[in-house]
Image: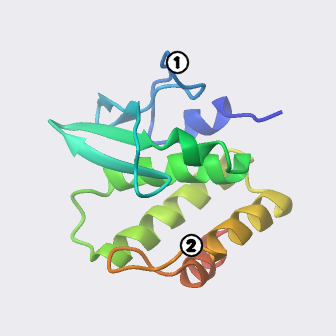
Amino acid sequence: MIRFFPLLLLLCACTPSVPPDWPLPQWRVHGAPVVYEAATLPAHASAQIRGGICFVSWDPDRWDTLAPSVRVFIIAHEIAHCELASAPLSPHAAEYAADCRAVQWMHRAGYLSASWLATLCAAIMDWPGSATHPSGPDRVMNILECAP
């Protein structure tokens, strides 16, 4: 069974309530609720701040292929981007920081067992790098350094 609720209570002093279209409770970032939207994306998920509100989008066609540990990581990672939006970080540094924060939240909530971490790292290992995202192997090294 996937246990999402305890993870959400630890994320960014959030106030949970269930969005109608997603089984994850609602989170608050800087006092504003996170809004979830399904969208066709070039990646699994993305986050942006619009009007002071964090919008987390995910691609349902890609989402169904992901392991639970990867889903939890991606949502936590995208919310971390909203929290870190005001930090003066390069694109790669922002990705590393969001990865770290997501892994630390997963650990505190009990979602970072050895098997979940192995599944997560195996999935990320194949992710391509770009001008805005480090390569999968570099991200895995960062995640392993951040994991308690």
Image quadrant assignment for residue 30: top left
The crowd level at tag 1 (other Cα within 10 Å; few <14, some 14-19, many 20+) is few
Q: Please tell me whether mark 1 sits on a helix, a strand or a loop.
A: loop
Q: Which residue is mark 1?
A: 18
| Residue 76 left/right relative to 1 | left
Is 19 situated left or right of 69 in this image? left
Real-space Cα separation, disc 1 to disc 2, in angstroms: 30 Å
Colour convention: rainbow
Q: Residue at x 46, y 80 (%)?
A: 129
Left or right, 133 with reference to 123: left
Q: Residue furthest left?
A: 51
In the image, residue 127 sits, relative to residue 1, either above or below, namely: below
Q: Is residue 4 above or below residue 49?
A: above
Amino acid at dot 1: Val
Q: Nearer the viewer, mark 1 or mark 2?
A: 2
Q: Residue 89: which quarter of the image?
A: bottom left
- Which quadrant is the N terminus positioned in? top right
Label drawn at residue 111: none
The relative height of residue 131 versus residue 101 in the rendered view (above or below) is below
Identify the residue at horizontal 70%, vertical 70% (top origin).
121
Which quarter of the rendering shows the C terminus?
bottom right
Callout 1–callout 2 Cβ contact below 8 Å: no
Q: Residue at x 30, y 74 (%)?
A: 91
* Residue that carries the numbered disc 2 in the rendered image: 127
Q: Amino acid at mark 2?
A: Trp
Is tag 1's residue or tag 2's residue first in the polypeptide sequence?
1
Give 50 or 130, whichever is nearer the viewer: 130
Tell me the crowding category of disc 2: few under 14, some 14 to 19, or many 20 or more residues within 10 angstroms, Cα based. some
Element marked by disc 2: loop
**Whole-percent x, y for residue 13 in the image:** 45, 36
**Residue 147 position in % (x across, y down):** 66, 69
